[in-house]
Amino acid sequence: MTQMERMKELVYLLNRASKAYYQEDREIMDNREYDELYSELEQLEKETGTVLTGSPTQAVGYESVDELPKETHPSPMLSLDKTKERSVLMDFVGDHKTLLSWKMDGLTIVLTYRDGVLAKSVTRGNGVVGEVVTNNARVFDNLPLKIPFRGELVLRGEAIITYSDFEKINREIEDVDARYKNPRNLCSGSVRQLNNEVTAKRHVRFYAFSLVSAKEIPSGQPDMQPLSEAASQDPDFENSNEKKMLWLKEQGFEIVDYRVVTRENLNETIDWFSEKIATNDFPSDGLVALYDDIRFGESLGTTAKFPRNAFAFKWADEMRETHLLEIEWSPSRTGLINPVAIFEPVDLEGTTVSRASVHNISIVKALELGIGDTITVYKANMIIPQIAENLTRSGDLTIPDTCPVCGGQAKIICENDVETLNCLNPDCQAKRIKSFSHFVSRDAMNIDGLSEATLEKFIARGFIHDFGDIFLLSRYREEIISMEGFGEKSFERLMNSIQKASVTTLPNFLYSLGILNIGLAGAKLLCRQYDHDFTALRRASEEDLSAIDGIGPVIAKTFVDYFANEVHNRIVDHLLTLVTIEKPEESSDDSLSGKTFVITGSLNHFSNRNELKAFIESKGGKVTGSVTGKTSFLINNDTASTSSKNKKARELNIPILSEEDFIEMTR
């Protein structure tokens, strides 16, 4: 492989890993492997003098998911250059007064206060564009909603969930496989909730680590009260980042714990931090060094990716030697069969571990694994167990040629130079998980207590073959309560949820079947057209369905094709013997008839978008996903947002309503 080919491969691998981590809140590559590949790419770029388009050495990150309003940061939030070598950090610090603080492992947030009140909260996102989460920040456990300073304050910090809260939340989830993997992922999902009631229950905390600006608000701005001189004047930080931190503390913020260092006391201070790790209640993946002298730091400027006034120090991984006992082959709903290493238990970072994901066949081969091999293991970010090295490299591991779930053919497939083991059986039970997960989801049959992990267990044990079998799970009471993660109480809760779900409406029933192109809105439209008569709807022709406004030939064909399938009809007939379909009460209020709405951003009065959507539809209105010339109103609590939907609405002269505006309109 040439240097250029290797660079292309590295760019692909690193960008894919970054996208999974920043945009999808999952990890496909541990930090140690990412850092090694990143360093290799940097070296190759130096050697070749070439930087490829999309290289992660030139980009900050990936775009955030489009579920919350987006906003561009006034200045890019660059990541930090990093090292695991004390000597490198020693060279950076030199004789300069430097602040050494925890590098907390959570979600970076930018806060803006105006006139002493929290005005805006935006996630880091990709470093250029973040998501507005103001409503959620207001329910963080330790965030001041008002501060003494009456000017405009912009600061950055880390939102985290402590280990103790993380463990408490996980203990309340009886299904072991459905529990969260680490505090960072739990925090990221909690901060980015559409319903801040969920955020409040997660006990998110905020720790300030950087004051961006603190300045007087120019006179004449609307909605601003007159300011006293002491409260509004720009504070004097005497050219010191430490003074900034102390000032933030005075304003009521909890700040990241730090120590002042120079070359003379750096080593002993790092030792002090490392001793604290075992007793810390918060996740941290290293330290951050920041020059105290503000002007000196600013004079250094930045590279394309890193500021030069700060440096990150990552902890060296704690390694343990052990022996590989077996490889467990774990099928997923996508057909991938993932290898999981089972080894003699070892103590790592304060816990006992005995298993680690090996990710794919390429890694299995690269490690030359064999049963009985001596391996070294570590915890990536002190959380996720990984194999670092195989010391004996016997390479005699047998890769199965059949799926452990269905017994069908398993084949190694190579895509983008990565080999994976895949089940080729289209009817494999593991692949059916997605359809069952959709069936029990909130907008479908709404059955609590049936996570994908639980469904997998029930399918593997033969409890569930089709949708109707879910309503017959009571037959397996004794077996279920004896399963790990279950008991009498959890079983009874599940049965109550199933009993409640057995009475439903036709739109929910129709949507739950997972018919291609039939969303909940489409299901409601079809049901209204046929007066909720399932027999008549089931027998409808393509021509009849295509004539319905909002359906069209594509949806009509997929609907008719579904009920032309004998297997589908058998599943539906079985289901109909177990559920009761009630006709919803027709509302006499059609005040929103002929009006089309688009909903974006977080909500305060309605628990989620689906609830607001249902309210609009109950009054004869229609909800769509994008702003067009046919849109009547855009609902967004942040009416002044510069999000794409708000911009489009302004261009088309479409009114932008807050929830209060909308509620007032419908009274």
Image (spheres, rainbow, N blue to C red):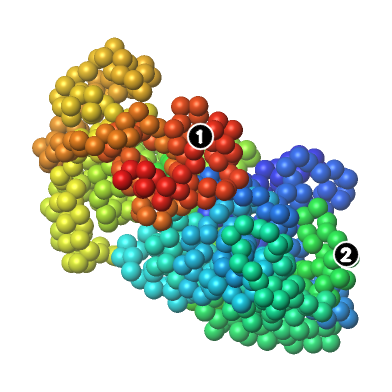
Q: Earlier in the sequence, mark 2 or mark 1?
A: 2
| Picture coordinates of residue 61, whole percent (x, y) | 67, 51
Residue at 61 percent across and 63 percent down: it is 224
Quarter of the image where one finds residue 268: bottom right
Which residue, as the protein is rendered here, is positioned at the far left? Answer: 577
Q: Quarter holding the N terminus?
A: top right
Q: Give the residue number, with chain letter if any, for mark 1.
A: 654
Instruction: Tell me: 421 left or right of 526.
Output: right
Instruction: Tell me: 361 left or right of 263.
Output: left
Above or below residue 582? Residue 139 is: below
Q: Give the residue number, with chain letter if any, for mark 2.
A: 300
Residue 53 visible within the image: yes
Instruction: Tell me: 271 left or right of 572.
Output: right
Looking at numbered disc 2 in the image, what kind of residue is underneath it?
A: Leu
Above or below residue 21? Residue 325 is: below
Quarter of the image where one finds residue 358: bottom right
